[in-house]
Image (cartoon, helix red, strand yellow):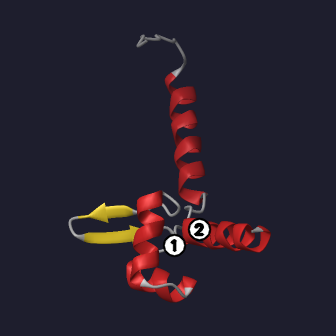
Amino acid sequence: MEGTLIVSIPVTEFIAYIEQTVRKVLTEKPVQQDKPLTSKEVMKLCNISTSTLQKWRNSGKIPFTQIDNKIFYSKDEVLSTIKNVSHSTIQN
């Protein structure tokens, strides 16, 4: 649902609010994301073969993003997968 809100406030108060918001945005540290990993990097990190990585992708065990013919992985998700795979292997 979209609506319109009309508020009457003094211009100086509006400008002060905008300045405060801009200062806050400029001083906040940006959330730094890790560089996406390639399939080669994931295989090395997990000590697995190409076919194992393919099986993990096909089964949904490891999330990935595909851009054209390149496949990328989030480092956090890869580490989480390693942890889950290790945990399930130990329990079986």
Residue at 55 percent across and 62 percent down: it is 30
Distance of label 1 from label 2 (alpha carbons): 8 Å
Residue density around tag 2, few if under 14, some if 14–19, many if 20 or more, within 10 Å = few
Give residue 76's mark: 2
Choose top left, top right, bottom left or bottom right for residue 78.
Answer: bottom right
What amino acid is labelled 1 in the image? Asp
Residue closer to the observer: 43 or 59:
59
Report the residue that reaches farthest toward the left: 68
Report the residue that reaches farthest toward the right: 91
Residue at 43 percent across and 64 percent down: it is 57
Residue density around tag 1, few if under 14, some if 14–19, many if 20 or more, within 10 Å = few
Where is residue 33 drawn, in percent x and y?
Answer: 52, 67
Choose top left, top right, bottom left or bottom right for residue 21.
Answer: top right
Vertically, is 45 above or below 18?
below
What amino acid is labelled 2 in the image? Asp
- The answer to which of marks 1 and 2 sits earlier in the sequence is 1
Vertically, is 47 above or below 91?
below
Callout 1 secondary element: loop
Residue at 56 percent across and 62 percent down: it is 31
Give residue 60's mark: none
Residue closer to the observer: 12 or 59:
59
The quarter of the picture where the C terminus appears is: bottom right
Choose top left, top right, bottom left or bottom right for residue 38.
Answer: bottom left
The quarter of the picture where the N terminus appears is: top left
Residue 37 in sight from this viewpoint: no
Residue position for label 1 = 34
Image side of residue 76 versus residue 3, left or right: right
Tag 1 and tag 2, C-beta contact below 8 Å: yes
Residue 12 in sight from this viewpoint: yes
Where is residue 83 drawn, in percent x and y?
Answer: 69, 71
Residue closer to the observer: 51 or 42:
51
